[in-house]
Image (spheres, rainbow, N blue to C red):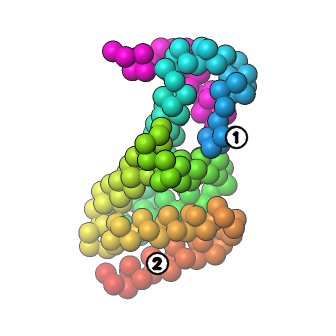
């Protein structure tokens, strides 16, 4: 087992959770070990020992963010109705548009963009994996094949989300999602 593949420990898990909270507040784009370590009650040396490298720490943070995002989206989808594509998309959008989730979504956009621009760094594969994650969630809806195209649903949700994050105009972005759902219902 290499240094960077060190299994979890209670201290590592605790610091990962603190680092994740820090990343939600400050982003990952310009993450520096010294300020991070000071903010979470550690030292750069301890972080490097526990995570192996800054890149491995970033990978762990991205994994933590994806797990959080997927769990929340799964819960929103199921609250909307696992067999009703429109209800599940609407519930997912309801979660995405909630201002309480903005820090996680901004972090997601930062990681997504870095993944596209730095395909060999710690961000490698993040964008592709999140597309697969979200497509999987939408395709799992029983009515997805008959009532809506998961790839089109993903494109609408992602586009509306990017617009929302850029403009803060929840009303307009929600209207776009609702217009899409009316089109799905009319085509079904």
| Residue 7 position (above or below residue 122) | above
Quarter of image, res 161 = bottom right
Secondary structure found at label 1: helix
Please state which of residues 127 and 142 is positioned toward the viewer in this rendering. Answer: 127
Image location of residue 31, percent across then percent down? 64, 36
> Mark 1: few, some, or many residues within 10 Å (few <14, many ≥20)?
some
Residue 72 is at least partly visible in this image: no
Magenta segment, prevailing SS (helix, strand or loop) = helix
Q: Which residue sits at x=73%, y=22%?
A: 38
Residue underneath mark 1: 26
Quadrant in which the C terminus is drawn: bottom left
Residue 37, magenta (yes or no): no
Image location of residue 116, percent across then percent down? 47, 54
Image location of residue 42, percent across then percent down? 67, 16
Using residue 153 as the reference point, say whether residue 136 is left or right of it: left
Q: Earlier in the sequence, mark 2 or mark 1?
A: 1
Q: Which residues are magenta?
A: 1-25
> Mark 2: few, some, or many residues within 10 Å (few <14, many ≥20)?
some
Q: Which residue sits at x=62%, y=29%?
A: 19
Residue underneath mark 2: 180
Using residue 135 as the reference point, say whether residue 57 is left or right of it: right
């Amino acid at each position: 087992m290499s240094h960077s593949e060190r299994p979890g420990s209670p201290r590592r898990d605790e610091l990962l959770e603190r680092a994740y909270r820090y990343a939600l507040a400050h982003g990952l784009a310009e993450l520096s070990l010294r300020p991070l370590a000071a903010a979470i009650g550690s030292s750069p040396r301890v972080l490097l020992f526990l995570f192996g490298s800054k890149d491995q720490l970033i990978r762990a943070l991205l994994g933590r963010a994806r797990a959080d995002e997927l769990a929340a989206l799964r819960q929103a989808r199921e609250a909307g109705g696992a067999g009703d594509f429109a209800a599940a998309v609407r519930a997912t959008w309801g979660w995405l548009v909630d201002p309480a989730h903005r820090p996680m979504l901004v972090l997601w956009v930062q990681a997504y963009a870095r993944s596209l621009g730095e395909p060999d760094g710690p961000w490698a594969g993040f964008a592709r994996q999140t597309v697969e994650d979200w497509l999987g969630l939408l395709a799992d809806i029983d009515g997805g094949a008959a009532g809506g195209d998961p790839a089109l649903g993903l494109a609408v949700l992602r586009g509306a989300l990017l617009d929302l994050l850029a403009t803060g105009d929840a009303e307009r972005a929600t209207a776009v999602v609702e217009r899409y759902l009316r089109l799905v219902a009319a085509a079904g």
